[in-house]
Image (spheres, rainbow, N blue to C red):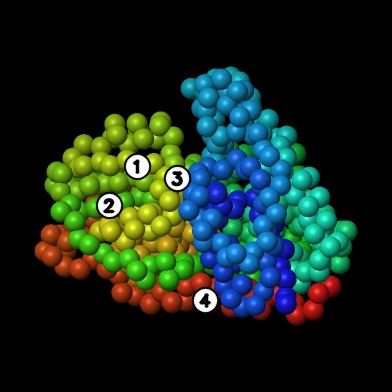
Amino acid sequence: MKRILLITYYFPPCGGAPVQRWLRFIPRLIDSGYGVTVICPEQGDYPSFDPSLLETIPGEVKIIRCGKNNIKRWWRLLTRKGDSLPYGNLERSEEDSWLKRLIVWLRLNLVIPDMRMVWNPSALNHAITELRSNAYNAVITTGPPQSTHLIGLKLKQMFPVYWITDFRDPWSEIHYLKLNPPGKHALKLHKHLEQRVLSTADMNVIVSHSIADQLPEGNKVVIYNGFEPEQFAKLSFSSGEQFRIKYIGMITAGQRLEPLINAMNDLHVGSTIEFSVIGKNDKAVHEKIKAASKSYSLKISDFLPHAKALEEMVNAELLVLLINEYEGNEGMLTTKLFEYLGSRTPILCLGNTRGEAAEVIRTCDAGNCFEYEDSGVSEYIRSVYQSWKDGNPLRSTGIISAYGTTGQIGKLLELIPDRRP
């Protein structure tokens, strides 16, 4: 039996987008005859929790949980106000206390590549024990957090392992470092570590072509996030009494809802439009949305279990995708985009109309894409709204099979060597 050792910081009971890629891959690996061992935190600092995802992990998977993190607790103590640990956002503002601004500066310039690296020693020790006891065809590290790849780098130095990295996001070019850059010495260290990882790994799997182009030289292959068709097979669309526009997920640095809110306010159709924001977002984000909302119904919900989130995607008339604004955002391809595709609900994408997300949406005839300040946003929403009002079915019908898990797992299996080192 071929065996894979997967090292990942984000794993159930962690919820949300960080875990979905490998939760789709692992059952397919098991079905293909692979043995899978996962090393993950015993207690991780996660943006959200979804214990129901534990039930989706095949019983054959060996899970090694190790290391207890207290990053969240220390962050809340040091920021005094009990601010939540930032995820995908390291912005500083004049409204923040001097202590919080100092902590963010220290994080940007001294904690490299990220705060989750405190888990690395425990994970490394368990990985060493596992590799000394069992033979594996490949070791896979997935990030963010990109510090996880440093575990793979160390293992590659110690053992004759075949090492595959999995980049779900950029490293030195990630949006929160572009929007709030660290000092030149910190950025130089990021790029040095990034280069060592890419050049040392036997293969680097990357979620988009643009991100692959941004990363340093190395053996690279692009495997999109994709979606699991079986998760949508039993879900069916039911039309509601209101025209339901939904944004599902966290709102992170560089994502702007204001143009969408302004466009909906300009429609002047009253409560026949319901706008839902569903996800783990700060109260300040919710208050800002409430203050800007004028001429439509607003529904704000906290994080939902994954199965419920998929139901929300299917039972909507329009789904909103926000591309973070920063230089080099062409490669931003989130898990959410592909699950939006699987839902067959039309997509309104705001952000870079020349990026890969926009290309995927156009290729699949799954919706429309606009720059943030494009006046066409209002016109598009009005056209979809009118189609709904006329009783037309609002389901996309483009070909999306290329982005299903079956195609993605086939590419991954081709990378795993037959022989163990």
Q: Are marks 3 and 2 in contact (CB under 8 Å)?
A: no
What is the three-letter code of the residue carrying label 3?
Met
Residue found at the far right of this picture: 158
Q: Nearer the viewer, residue 252 or 228?
A: 228
Q: Which quarter of the figure is the N terminus placed in?
A: bottom right
Within 10 Å of disc 2 (Cα), the crowding (few <14, some 14-19, many 20+) is many
- Residue type, numbered disc 1: Ser
Q: Nearer the viewer, mark 3 or mark 4?
A: 4
The residue beneath circle 3 is: 250
Q: Which callout, 1 or 3, points to the residue nearer the camera? A: 1
Q: Which residue is mark 4?
A: 406
Q: Residue at x 59, y 58 (%)?
A: 168
Q: List x then y, in percent, for residue 335.
A: 49, 59
CB under 8 Å between discs 4 and 1: no
Q: Are marks 2 and 1 in contact (CB under 8 Å)?
A: no
Which comes before the other along the chain, label 1 or label 3? 3
Give the camera-side residue of 125 and 183: 125
- The residue carrying mark 2 is 245
At 52% across and 32% down in the image, what residue appears? 84
Choose between 34 and 417: the one closer to the eye.
34
For marks 4 and 1, the one nearer the N-term is 1
| Residue 15 relative to residue 161: left or right | left
Determine whether 274 is above or below 236 in the image.
above
The circle on residue 49 is none
User: Which kind of residue does numbered mark 4 sit on?
Assistant: Thr
Sequence-wise, the earlier of marks 3 and 2 is: 2
Q: Label for residue 301? A: 1
**Residue 255 in view (yes/no):** no
User: How far apart are labels 4 and 2 at the CA level?
Assistant: 30 Å
The image shows residue 326 at horizontal and vertical percentages of 51, 48
Q: Is residue 98 left or right of residue 295?
A: right
Q: Position of residue 220 (x, y in %)?
A: 68, 68
